[in-house]
Image (cartoon, helix red, strand yellow):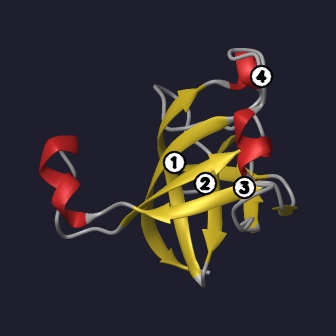
Amino acid sequence: MSVPGQNILLIALGAIARTPVAYYKDIGRTTSATGRDVTQFADVVIIEDSQVQAVPRNRYENMGLDYQKDYVTWFVANNVIDLKCDVSGDQMTWNGKRYQLVSETDWFAMDGWTYVLCVQIGTA
């Protein structure tokens, strides 16, 4: 097996359970009547080729995470957008909860998958 260049996530999903999620792609912002920026999302897409895992609380301190929030990591075979300057970022729902994509480790260009830290922002 050749790495990089292999989609390791799709290989791993042959051995571990896939976690389907509902994905909401950020398509830009509009300004409301009150002057507030409102993120617009494309129609929901169900992504089958992914895996969601809870972030263990004993890793929160090392990762600089807020103990008052819940986080998951999402391994996905899609090119997604996290929070960036002037970009609200994509969102996803899993297990009845809605998550904001916060920080992505982009392996997509090289290997066809992405690892994303997500924070819970509400319910689905």
Q: Nearer the viewer, residue 26 or 93?
A: 93
Pointer 1 with pointer 4, Cβ within 8 A: no
Q: Judge by depth and name the residue closer to the eye, 12 or 25.
A: 12
Helix, strand or loop under label 1: loop
Please report the residue visible at 74 percent of the width from the left and 48 percent of the height from the top. 25
Quarter of the N terminus within the rendering: top right
Identify residue for label 3.
50
Q: Quadrant of residue 70?
A: bottom left
Numbered disc 2: secondary structure: loop
Q: Residue 102 at x, y = what percent? A: 45, 44
Q: Amino acid at mark 2?
A: Ser
Instruction: Give the foreground label among 4 and 2.
Output: 4
Residues at badges 3 and 1 in contact (C-beta under 8 Å)? no
* Mark closer to the chain start, 4 or 2: 4
The image shows residue 79 at horizontal and vertical percentages of 74, 33
Which type of secondary structure does the marked residue at label 3 adopt?
strand
Secondary element at tag 4 = loop
Residue lying farthest to the left in this orientation: 61
Q: Residues within 10 Å of mark 4 (few under 14, many from 20)?
A: few
Q: Which label belongs to residue 1? A: 4
Which residue corresponds to mark 2? 32
The amino acid pointed to by label 1 is Gly
For the residues labelled 4 and 3, the Cα–Cα distance comes to: 21 Å
Residue at x 60%, y 81% (from the top left corner): 95
Q: Earlier in the sequence, mark 4 or mark 3?
A: 4
Quadrant position of the C terminus in the picture: bottom right
